[in-house]
Amino acid sequence: MAPRKLTPPVLGADASQKAVAALRKHLSAQLSPVLCVEDAALAARCRAMASRESALHASQPDARQEAFPLDGPDWSQLREDLTALAERTLRRLAPDVPRLPLDARLCLRRYPPGHTGQRLGAHVDDTLCTLLWASTPGLEILAPQDDAAWNGADVAKVGLPTMGPPPKVVQEDDWATVTPPSADCFLFTPGNGWSGIVTSVPLRSPTLHRVAVGGDVERLSLPLLVSVRGDYGSALNSVGEALRQISLDGAAKAAEDRLSPLTEVLGVELLQHLDAESLCRLNMCARFFGEEHATTRRSRCEDAARERALDLMQGHVTGLC
């Protein structure tokens, strides 16, 4: 049975605020979020450079997929331009995320013709996000028929041994082939690092995907793996995870907003004297007891704690950026 085809929505350069807001909701609702980003000139450069580079490498006998490092000033410039596109996309989806020092890895993957079936196993990228150019379709994402029965914890267990209840079983018809609407599109997918940093666009799960290519067509791809740089990423992820691990169980039983009045009395300047762990604890309390703003869905106390936490992380890497 041929896999189902899925065409992601497109984030166009001229997309309105309303359209971008709809894309945010779409990403949050999907078990395997993915969208298309159009840049015809950049896609044409990728196609030309990938073809030239591939011609320099002889195919290995019986290789189902091959990866090649990319060196030289032309590739460095392309990596820089692709990173800028990924950062612009992130900025449009989540304008409240602070400007972060990013690391980006780029390689060429080649899937020789003559093989069928899975070429790259199912996985979630250990990145903030991934921007992918490919010469032909082949990326498949998890899109189970019983989508509503799945959550992020189920996705995280796919393919892993477990001592607890058996994980959900992924059938072949649970995969869908991603088919961009045009050759000018890049695929943008969130990775494992997304939820700790991009709190304004919550996800059910990062994107679980694999590559399956068949027939006599060679597939070339240029995946750009984007992560937050070094210690900055680790520190910010730690704070982000602490801010995210908040249980709202029993919130309806809270008789009053306890922390906002306290902050009003003591002043938000109090937050200047708290370390990262204390800020995270305060933030959890604020989310539990604080009254949410209609737009940001954060209380005043939580907002101040979050901004101070980000300032703290910025100071942590002064001189590294």
Image: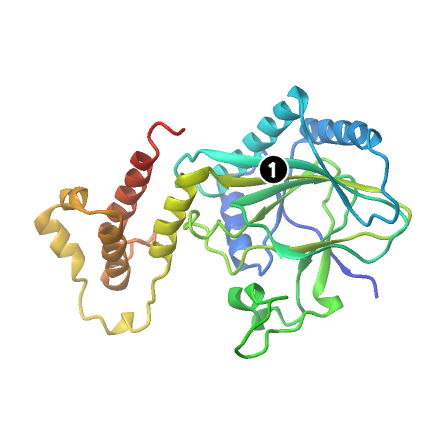
How many other residues sit within 10 Å of disc 1, few (<14), some (14-19) or many (≥20)? some
- Residue 14 visible to the viewer: no
Measuring from the top left, give residue 273's x and y in whole percent.
16, 44
Quadrant containing the N terminus is: bottom right
**Would you say 134 lies left or right of 255 here?**
right
Q: Which of the two residues, 260 or 97, is positioned nearer the viewer here?
A: 97
Q: Is residue 164 above or below residue 150?
A: below
Quadrant containing the C terminus is: top left
Q: Is residue 288 above or below residue 268?
A: below
Measuring from the top left, give residue 161's x and y in whole percent.
59, 70
* Outermost residue toward the front in this view: 61
Q: Which of the two residues, 201 or 232, is positioned nearer the viewer here?
A: 232
Residue drawn 53% across and 59% down? 205
Residue drawn 41% across and 51% down? 199
Say which residue label 1 marks: 12
Measuring from the top left, give residue 275's x and y in whole percent.
22, 47
